[in-house]
Protein backbone atom coordinates (compact mmCIF):
# COMPACT_ATOMS: atom_id res chain seq x y z
CA UNK A 1 0.00 0.00 0.00
CA UNK A 2 2.97 2.30 0.56
CA UNK A 3 3.78 2.22 -3.15
CA UNK A 4 0.24 3.44 -3.92
CA UNK A 5 0.64 6.33 -1.48
CA UNK A 6 4.01 7.15 -3.00
CA UNK A 7 2.67 7.14 -6.58
CA UNK A 8 -0.13 9.59 -5.80
CA UNK A 9 2.07 11.81 -3.63
CA UNK A 10 4.70 12.07 -6.37
CA UNK A 11 2.00 12.78 -8.96
CA UNK A 12 0.57 15.58 -6.81
CA UNK A 13 3.94 17.16 -6.07
CA UNK A 14 5.00 16.93 -9.72
CA UNK A 15 1.73 18.49 -10.87
CA UNK A 16 1.99 21.43 -8.49
CA UNK A 17 5.64 22.06 -9.45
CA UNK A 18 4.70 22.09 -13.14
CA UNK A 19 1.35 23.89 -12.96
CA UNK A 20 1.63 26.57 -10.28
CA UNK A 21 4.33 28.62 -12.05
CA UNK A 22 2.13 28.78 -15.15
CA UNK A 23 -0.05 31.35 -13.36
CA UNK A 24 2.86 33.80 -13.57
CA UNK A 25 4.16 33.11 -17.07
CA UNK A 26 1.36 33.95 -19.49
CA UNK A 27 3.52 36.62 -21.19
CA UNK A 28 6.47 34.23 -21.56
CA UNK A 29 4.13 31.52 -22.82
CA UNK A 30 2.79 33.95 -25.44
CA UNK A 31 6.33 34.74 -26.57
CA UNK A 32 7.66 31.17 -26.58
CA UNK A 33 4.59 29.51 -28.11
CA UNK A 34 2.91 31.86 -30.58
CA UNK A 35 0.27 32.79 -31.37
CA UNK A 36 -0.52 34.59 -28.14
CA UNK A 37 -3.32 33.29 -25.92
CA UNK A 38 -6.58 34.84 -27.12
CA UNK A 39 -8.83 33.33 -24.45
CA UNK A 40 -6.99 33.64 -21.13
CA UNK A 41 -9.99 32.20 -19.29
CA UNK A 42 -9.24 28.82 -20.90
CA UNK A 43 -5.55 29.07 -20.01
CA UNK A 44 -6.18 29.97 -16.36
CA UNK A 45 -9.18 27.66 -16.17
CA UNK A 46 -7.03 24.73 -17.30
CA UNK A 47 -4.42 25.54 -14.67
CA UNK A 48 -7.04 25.81 -11.92
CA UNK A 49 -8.79 22.56 -12.80
CA UNK A 50 -5.48 20.74 -13.13
CA UNK A 51 -4.34 22.04 -9.73
CA UNK A 52 -7.59 20.80 -8.18
CA UNK A 53 -6.72 17.32 -9.47
CA UNK A 54 -3.37 17.51 -7.68
CA UNK A 55 -5.23 18.03 -4.41
CA UNK A 56 -7.27 14.91 -5.18
CA UNK A 57 -4.04 12.97 -5.72
CA UNK A 58 -2.91 14.01 -2.23
CA UNK A 59 -6.24 12.86 -0.76
CA UNK A 60 -5.89 9.49 -2.47
CA UNK A 61 -2.33 9.24 -1.12
CA UNK A 62 -3.57 9.80 2.42
CA UNK A 63 -6.09 6.94 2.26
CA UNK A 64 -5.97 4.90 -0.99
CA UNK A 65 -8.54 2.36 0.17
CA UNK A 66 -11.11 4.99 1.07
CA UNK A 67 -10.61 6.90 -2.19
CA UNK A 68 -10.01 3.91 -4.46
CA UNK A 69 -12.90 4.74 -6.78
CA UNK A 70 -11.46 8.22 -7.32
CA UNK A 71 -8.51 6.49 -8.95
CA UNK A 72 -10.74 5.78 -11.97
CA UNK A 73 -11.31 9.43 -12.95
CA UNK A 74 -7.66 10.08 -12.03
CA UNK A 75 -6.61 7.50 -14.61
CA UNK A 76 -8.93 9.11 -17.15
CA UNK A 77 -7.52 12.58 -16.39
CA UNK A 78 -4.01 11.37 -17.17
CA UNK A 79 -4.89 9.43 -20.32
CA UNK A 80 -7.32 11.98 -21.79
CA UNK A 81 -4.66 14.69 -21.75
CA UNK A 82 -1.75 12.41 -22.59
CA UNK A 83 -3.30 10.71 -25.61
CA UNK A 84 -4.87 13.94 -26.90
CA UNK A 85 -1.45 15.60 -27.01
CA UNK A 86 0.12 12.48 -28.50
CA UNK A 87 -2.40 12.58 -31.35
CA UNK A 88 -1.88 16.32 -31.80
CA UNK A 89 1.88 15.77 -31.97
CA UNK A 90 1.47 13.07 -34.62
CA UNK A 91 -0.64 15.59 -36.58
CA UNK A 92 2.14 18.19 -36.19
CA UNK A 93 -0.15 20.34 -34.03
CA UNK A 94 1.74 20.07 -30.71
CA UNK A 95 5.35 20.74 -29.75
CA UNK A 96 7.92 18.26 -28.50
CA UNK A 97 7.67 20.01 -25.11
CA UNK A 98 3.94 19.29 -25.00
CA UNK A 99 4.66 15.70 -25.99
CA UNK A 100 7.11 15.29 -23.13
CA UNK A 101 4.46 16.38 -20.62
CA UNK A 102 1.95 14.05 -22.28
CA UNK A 103 4.31 11.09 -21.98
CA UNK A 104 4.77 11.83 -18.28
CA UNK A 105 0.98 11.94 -17.84
CA UNK A 106 0.56 8.63 -19.70
CA UNK A 107 3.22 7.12 -17.41
CA UNK A 108 1.33 8.36 -14.35
CA UNK A 109 -1.87 6.91 -15.86
CA UNK A 110 -0.21 3.50 -16.08
CA UNK A 111 1.03 3.84 -12.50
CA UNK A 112 -2.49 4.81 -11.39
CA UNK A 113 -3.85 1.61 -12.99
CA UNK A 114 -1.21 -0.35 -11.08
CA UNK A 115 -2.21 1.48 -7.88
CA UNK A 116 -5.90 0.72 -8.47
CA UNK A 117 -5.30 -3.02 -8.72
CA UNK A 118 -2.76 -3.00 -5.89
CA UNK A 119 -5.32 -1.43 -3.52
CA UNK A 120 -7.34 -4.36 -2.21
CA UNK A 121 -10.61 -3.94 -0.33
CA UNK A 122 -9.45 -6.14 2.55
CA UNK A 123 -6.23 -4.19 3.16
CA UNK A 124 -5.91 -1.97 6.18
CA UNK A 125 -4.56 1.51 5.60
CA UNK A 126 -0.86 1.32 6.53
Image (cartoon, rainbow, N blue to C red):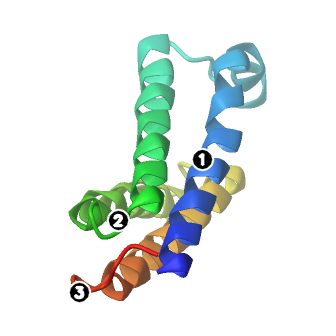
Disc on the earlier residue, 1 or 2: 1
Q: Quadrant of residue 66?
A: bottom left
Q: Nearer the viewer, residue 37 or 126?
A: 126
Real-space Cα distance between discs 1 and 3?
30 Å
How dense is the environment of label 1, judged by Cα within 10 Å: few (below 14), some, or many (20 and up)? some
Does dot 3 land on a helix, a strand or a loop? loop
46 vs 111: above or below: above
Q: Which residue is mark 2?
A: 75
Q: Quadrant of residue 10?
A: bottom right
Disc on the earlier residue, 3 or 2: 2
Q: Quadrant of residue 120?
A: bottom left
Does dot 1 land on a helix, a strand or a loop? helix
Real-space Cα distance between discs 3 and 2?
22 Å
Residue 42 position within the rendered picture, expressed as x and y whole percent measured from the top left = 42, 21
Q: Which residue is mark 3?
A: 122
Q: Is residue 46 visible?
A: yes
Residue 109 position within the rendered picture, expressed as x and y whole percent measured from the top left = 44, 70
Does dot 2 land on a helix, a strand or a loop? helix
Residue at the image position 50 percent from the left and 63 percent from the top:
86
Residue 73 position within the rendered picture, expressed as x and y whole percent measured from the top left = 26, 57
Q: Nearer the viewer, residue 78 or 60?
A: 60
Q: Nearer the viewer, residue 90 or 84?
A: 84
Disc on the earlier residue, 1 or 3: 1
Amino acid sequence: MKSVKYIFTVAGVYGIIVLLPMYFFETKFNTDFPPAITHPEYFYGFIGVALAWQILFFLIAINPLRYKLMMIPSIMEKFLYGFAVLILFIQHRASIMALSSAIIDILFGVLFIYAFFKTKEKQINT
